[in-house]
């Protein structure tokens, strides 16, 4: 199966692997095979089709990058995990099924919650990590994402727009343009589409986030690995102060905040983000 770097994310085939926990994971692998790949941890209610093709293609030019569906989501089997910790256990099972003992990670939003729990479970697994549009366990305002998400879903229904138009971007002229461009990119793939995410997964994941947002904060000072924290200056979903908080608590972290950007800042500024991420992983 040809998954070399010239394959675009819009055409790279969906593959499947069954982990030791019995879950059959759907995933897409792009870029030249490497001993340490980048694993992409996706956001709330995201399936494989929700990965930004510009981000994936940009990273695949230099790295092997692998995206996957969480348990019960999209084309992955099983029922939805009910906690962020269980999602991390599933993710670990997926990585082990692929045969890796060390990985790099790019995580966005809820994916960052899962990745932090994964690091706690398996401290030597992650070599470098990007935490974008995310926050720490027990972070201020994280549990509020539940009400905000439901509100913007309703808003999207009334305006005939994808809720990500409101959840990921600002209401400025530049923000609206970035939202339209991002949503158009997600439609570039026309074949081998993933199974849409349903209400059951939405409820399970929001409940898990609500619980995680009220749990005891983790001691991030024990993680010595290089960390890149990125966000927009106006993130409503995972409030931007959480990014500043995380960057201070990790001993070896770099922070970048995009101006006039929201939760999906890395998609709005995808060209700059890819350059920063490539530099970070190459350092």
Image (cartoon, rainbow, N blue to C red):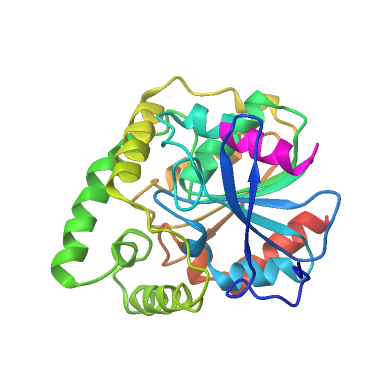
Relative to 212, residue 25 above or below = below
In the displayed structure, does residue 146 sit left or right of residue 13? left
Q: Quadrant of residue 253?
A: top right
Predominant secondary structure in magenta? helix
In front of the other: 241 or 144: 144
In front of the other: 67 or 252: 67
**Residue 75 location in percent, x, y?**
49, 52
- Over which residues does the magenta segment extend? 90-102
Q: Quadrant of residue 18?
A: top right
In the displayed structure, does residue 118 sit left or right of residue 163? right
- Give the residue at x 66% y 72%: 57
User: Is residue 208 on the magenta stretch?
Assistant: no
Quadrant into which the N terminus falls? bottom right
Q: Residue furthest top?
A: 216
User: Is residue 92 on the magenta stretch?
Assistant: yes
Relative to 196, residue 131 above or below = above
In the displayed structure, does residue 91 sit left or right of residue 156? right
**Residue 104 location in percent, x, y?**
73, 47
In the displayed structure, does residue 231 sit left or right of residue 161? right
Observer able to see residue 93 = yes
- Give the residue at x 83% y 59%: 33
């Amino acid at each position: 199966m040809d998954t070399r770097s010239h394959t675009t994310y819009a055409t790279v085939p969906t593959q499947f692997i069954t982990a030791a926990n019995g879950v059959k994971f759907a995933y897409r692998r792009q870029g030249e095979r490497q001993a340490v790949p980048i694993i992409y941890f996706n956001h709330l209610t995201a399936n494989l089709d929700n990965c930004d093709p510009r981000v994936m293609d940009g990273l695949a030019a230099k790295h092997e990058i692998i995206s996957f569906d969480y348990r019960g989501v999209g084309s992955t089997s099983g029922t939805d995990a009910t906690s962020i910790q269980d999602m991390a256990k599933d993710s670990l099972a997926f990585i082990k099924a692929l045969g890796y003992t060390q990985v790099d990670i790019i995580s966005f939003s809820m994916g960052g919650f899962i990745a932090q729990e994964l690091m706690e479970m398996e401290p030597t697994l992650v070599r470098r990590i990007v935490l974008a549009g995310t926050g720490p366990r027990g972070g201020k305002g994280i549990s509020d994402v539940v009400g905000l998400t439901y509100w913007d879903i309703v808003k999207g229904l009334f305006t005939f727009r994808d809720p990500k138009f409101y959840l990921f971007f600002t209401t400025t002229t530049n923000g609206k343009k970035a939202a339209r461009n991002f949503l158009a990119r997600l439609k570039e793939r026309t074949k081998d589409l993933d199974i849409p995410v349903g209400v059951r997964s939405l409820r399970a994941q929001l409940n898990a986030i609500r619980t995680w947002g009220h749990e005891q904060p983790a001691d991030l000072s024990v993680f010595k690995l290089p960390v890149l924290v990125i966000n927009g200056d106006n993130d409503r979903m995972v409030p931007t102060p959480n990014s500043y908080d995380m960057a201070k608590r990790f001993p070896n972290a770099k922070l970048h905040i995009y101006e006039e950007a929201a939760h999906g800042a890395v998609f709005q500024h995808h060209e700059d983000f890819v350059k920063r991420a490539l530099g970070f992983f190459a350092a």
